[in-house]
Image: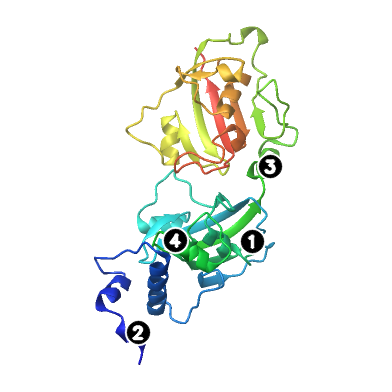
Amino acid sequence: MNKKLLIPLALLCLLAPGCAKKTTSTTGADAKEYLQLWMDKFHPGINANADGLYILEDIPGTGEDWNSEKAYIFTEATIRSLSGTISSTTDETLAKQLGTYAVGNYYGPKYQAIGSGISYAGVDALLKGMKMGGSRTAVVPAWMLTTSRYNTQQAYIDACTVSTSLIYSITLVGQTDDPDEDAIATLREYVTAVYGQDVQPVSYNTEETADGSFYFISDTSAFDDVETIDDSKSIQVNYTGKLLDGTVFDTTLEKVAKDAGIYSSDKTYTSATMNYSTTYGNVLMGTSSSIINGFKGGISLMKWKGQKATVIFTSKHGYTSSGSGNTIPGFAPLVFELEILAD
């Protein structure tokens, strides 16, 4: 007798994507039983691998092998529930199809830290055997959605307290131990291509030497050293912040916002009032010091009203590994165009 025919109607409803009511389980054993029934219904013939994952699609890459000793992967990813609902994606085309796309949001590869206590065990298992440039889609079982590490599948199942398995689709773009170190090389290439090889990195912090993570570019030939701005003076600053690919994420200029597609009628586009100082730590926006160091450092290196400058820096001087909202991913190098307005 075909045992599949003995599945209760209520469970078949649970398996069907269109059913309105769903039951949940809270143990690994229940999650395992449910997932096996789901696989039998929607992906018959696909068996779990040694790590409990069900590989649905595998497109081999041609680059170097994934190295589990590397601290970070650089990857594009989409996460779905078993019913097909997408909870997260870095794919711009897919976001547009879903109606979740927003101009100004970042789409593309992102860095993700990997390892015990950091990433899901199932994500690490998904990466096994992959090469750079490869793509893989797999069902990651609920018991592998933990940052803990165990020696056996049964130990994972015994420790499981959730029931939700997920479908992960990833494209492995790169890997590294230090995204900011990689960004230093990227900045050098960018600056050389845009401004020429004579432009060298600087430091806005008098206690640190230039390490290649910060560049300051400004034409000062029209200014007189006698007319420099005094410390603690109030100044008006226009700025535009961009990702290295040119995507604008913030600006004080209405035309720039409109051209970039990020204009909001709720925002007043006007220059920012700032407290000037040649010491970056004393630069304020209004009365607030909570400005990223790269921005403050750029202002501190400017000297004259009417001066324009471009600062380019790694996330060490910006939003670090956290990024900022949906617009700036973690470890993103940034470009700021600055102008201190003349009186």
Q: Which residue is mark 4?
A: 160
Q: Amino acid at mark 3?
A: Glu
Which one is in front in this view, the residue at disc 2 or the one at disc 4?
4
Q: Residue 4 shows which numbered tag? A: 2
Which one is in front in this view, the residue at disc 2 or the one at disc 1?
2
Position of residue 238 in the picture relative to residue 269 (left or right) = right
Cα–Cα gap, marks 1 and 4: 31 Å
Q: Amino acid at mark 1?
A: Met
Cα–Cα gap, marks 2 and 3: 54 Å
Label 3 crowd bin: few (<14), some (14–19), many (20+), radius 10 Å: some
Residue drawn 25% across the image and 78% down it: 9
Q: Quadrant of residue 202?
A: top right
Position of 232 relative to 179 (above/below):
above
Q: Earlier in the sequence, mark 2 or mark 3?
A: 2
Q: Amino acid at mark 2?
A: Lys
Residue 188 lies, in percent from the top left, at 70, 40
Position of residue 9 in the picture relative to residue 303 (left or right) = left
Cα–Cα gap, marks 2 and 4: 26 Å
Position of residue 73 in the picture relative to residue 29 (left or right) = right
Q: Closest to the observer: 278 or 227?
A: 278
Cα–Cα gap, marks 2 and 1: 40 Å
Cα–Cα gap, marks 3 and 1: 19 Å
Residue drawn 66% across the image and 20% down it: 220
Residue farthest along the bottom direction in this orientation: 1
Residue farthest along the right direction in this orientation: 198
Residue 331 lies, in percent from the top left, at 58, 42
Secondary element at tag 2: helix
Secondary element at tag 3: helix
Q: Residue 132 shows which numbered tag? A: 1
